[in-house]
Image (spheres, rainbow, N blue to C red):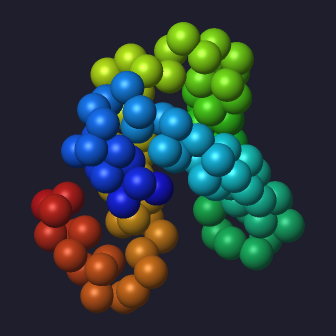
C-alpha cells in the first residue's frame, strides 16, 4: 500500500491516494481481525485488551468513515493517514529481517 499511495500522490496529488489503495486497505484492515482471534486462542502472546481497540479503531476508520462517507476520501489528511499507517505497518510486519532493524533506527 505504501508504494501505491506514494505513487498516486506523486503522479496525481492527494485526491487520488485513497482510490489507489482502497481495496488493499480494506482487505488488510479486515484481515487484521485475525490478530484478535490469534490472541484469543493463544497463538500469539499479544494481549487482546490492547489488540482489540487498535484493530477496532482501524476498522472504524476504514469501514465506518472512509467507506460510508465517500466525500472524505479525497481530503488531504486521508493521504497522510494512509501513508503514515503504511509506514507503521512496514515496521510492524517487515518482509525482511533487515528491514526491522532499519525501522528501529527510524523510531529511535
Q: Position of residue 14 (x, y in %)?
A: 31, 30
**Residue 26 location, quadrant:** top right
Considering only vertical position in the picture, is 12 above or below 97? above
Q: Is residue 106 left or right of residue 23?
A: left
Residue 96 appears anywhere in the view: yes
Relative to 81, 35 lies left or right = right
Above/below status of 69 relative to 62: above
Q: Quadrant of the C terminus?
A: bottom left
Residue at the spot 60% in from the left edge and 53% down from the top edge: 24
On the question of residue 88 being in view, the answer is no
Horizontal and vertical percent position of residue 55: 64, 43
Q: Is residue 8 left or right of residue 36?
A: left
In the image, farthest residue toward the bottom: 97
Q: How many marks?
A: 0
Query: Where on the picture, by quarter, is residue 45?
Result: bottom right
- Residue drawn 67% across the image and 25% down it: 67
Q: Residue at x 48, y 70 (%)?
A: 93
Residue 20 lies, in percent from the top left, at 49, 44
Q: What residue occupies the far front of the structure in this picture? A: 11
- Give residue 10's quadrant in the image: top left
Nearer to the camera, 59 or 83: 83
Residue at position x 85%, y 67% in the image: 41
Q: Is residue 54 above or below residue 47?
A: above
Residue 60 position within the rendered picture, expressed as x and y whole percent measured from the top left: 66, 27
- Residue furthest right in the image: 41
Amino acid at each position: 500500500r505504501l508504494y501505491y499511495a506514494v505513487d498516486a500522490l506523486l503522479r496525481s496529488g492527494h485526491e487520488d491516494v485513497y482510490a489507489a489503495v482502497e481495496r488493499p486497505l480494506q482487505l488488510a484492515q479486515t484481515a487484521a481481525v485475525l490478530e484478535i482471534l490469534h490472541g484469543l486462542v493463544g497463538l500469539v502472546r499479544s494481549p487482546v485488551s490492547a489488540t482489540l481497540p487498535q484493530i477496532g479503531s482501524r476498522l472504524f476508520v476504514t469501514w465506518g468513515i472512509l467507506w460510508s462517507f465517500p466525500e472524505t476520501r479525497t481530503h488531504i489528511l486521508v493521504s497522510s493517514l494512509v501513508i503514515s499507517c503504511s509506514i507503521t505497518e512496514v515496521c510492524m510486519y517487515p518482509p525482511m529481517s533487515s528491514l526491522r532493524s532499519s525501522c528501529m533506527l527510524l523510531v529511535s
